[in-house]
Image (spheres, grey):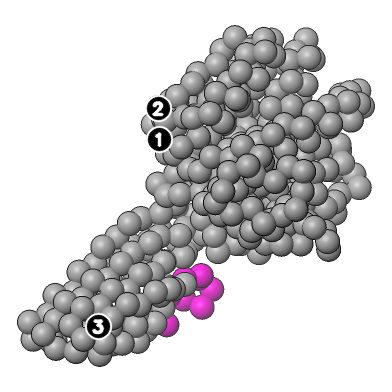
Amino acid sequence: MVTELIKKEIENYFPEMVELRRYMHMNPEVSFNEKNTAKFIENYLRELGIQDIKTDVGLYGVVARIKGKNSKNTIAFRADFDALPINDAKITTYKSKKENVMHACGHDGHTATLLVTCKILMKNINKLQHDVVAIFQYGEEQAPGGAKTMIDSGCLDNIDVIFGAHLWTPLPLGTLGYSYRELCAAADRFEIKITSKENSNLIAANFVSMTQQIVSRFSKPQETLVITLGKLESTKHIASITGTIRHFNKKLHKLVLDKLKKLCLSLESEYEDTKVEFIYYGGYPPLINHKKGTEEIISCTKEILPQLIISEVEPLMIGEDFSYYVENIPGAFFLIGAGNSTFAKYPHHHPNFDFEERVMSHTASIFLNLAFNSDKVVTNLKEKK
């Protein structure tokens, strides 16, 4: 049975997963500077004997296609590989070698997981009915991200469905969190610049107050809309405000942008010799899963890892550019428990961040079960409701 094969191979190659992850953890590269990491990924994949490998996709993206018996129902998996500008405060043998650069979100684990998944697929390629594509993505941590540019460069060409996962320390090891629809919010950044002969502090205070009225007046109670004003700097005549808009509804997002722009114009007309500039930096769209994709994740998990506790999670108010993939083709994204009460208790983006490495075997098991059952999985996702 394929489940027994997967379990055996995962146990055989779990130490290699750990080794790969720790190498990456010691050699991190921040978003849009991951040239060496991309080369490391490429070299590993070539050593596996994969023939169809595209590099520099978008910028540093790597896309590998493992050929099954046919290409009719092709399934893809995505792993991100960028690090963060954070100093690693852990005391471990695999601490980052680079000052102020650290894998503080688990992307080293994501990449190690998908690399070993590819290795197991290549070893058992005679059992692979359909093509499997591994997408290794740069730049997830920093908008505009790497996903959209990779998609524009053709990384989803001839792919039917896609899956991704995020190891998640708020969930304990041995758990999986899913959502049938919204999982991660859109997170857009904006800035307000005020210049005035009048008191810019007063104008900025009025902007802050009136912004919160947008939330109360124009969003319904069942809709999630959060406008956060995170930083305000002000002198007598100059002020700047930076903030974010988090939501799950594109129509509501458009309305909010329009209201913020009109608010700036109204403040300009209310105060003499005043300029209120609205600067929109954008961000990622909301990550909205395809229901059937989540159903396949749950089904495959129950089959290969019956001991895992599976539960529906509340949508997260964070951005994740996997959203672009599932805007283009069917698929789903899930959270896989990686936390504990000791060394893996710290939140993501914390200087002491670490995770239970066994989580990588859980994710790889799920990916492999989806891949070896791609005929059923893809057919189900492509069916009309």
Task: Name the residue rendered at 69%, 34% in the picture.
Answer: 23
Labels 2 & 1 near each other (Cβ < 8 A): yes
Task: Name the residue rendered at 77%, 57% in the picture.
Answer: 344
Q: CA distance from mark 3 to mark 1?
A: 39 Å
Q: CA distance from mark 2 to mark 1?
A: 6 Å
| Residue 149: mark in rendering | 1
Residue 290 lies, in percent from the top left, at 59, 45
- Residue type pointed to by label 3: Thr
Residue 312 lies, in percent from the top left, at 73, 59
- Residue type pointed to by label 1: Thr
| Quadrant position of residue 350 | bottom right
Upstream in the sequence, badge 2 or badge 3? 2
Q: Is residue 336 magenta?
A: no
Name the residue carrying label 3.
Answer: 235
Name the residue carrying label 2.
Answer: 153
Q: In the image, is residue 298 above or below residue 129?
A: below
Which secondary structure, mark 1?
A: helix
- Residue type pointed to by label 2: Ser
Task: Name the residue rendered at 41%, 54% in the picture.
Answer: 283
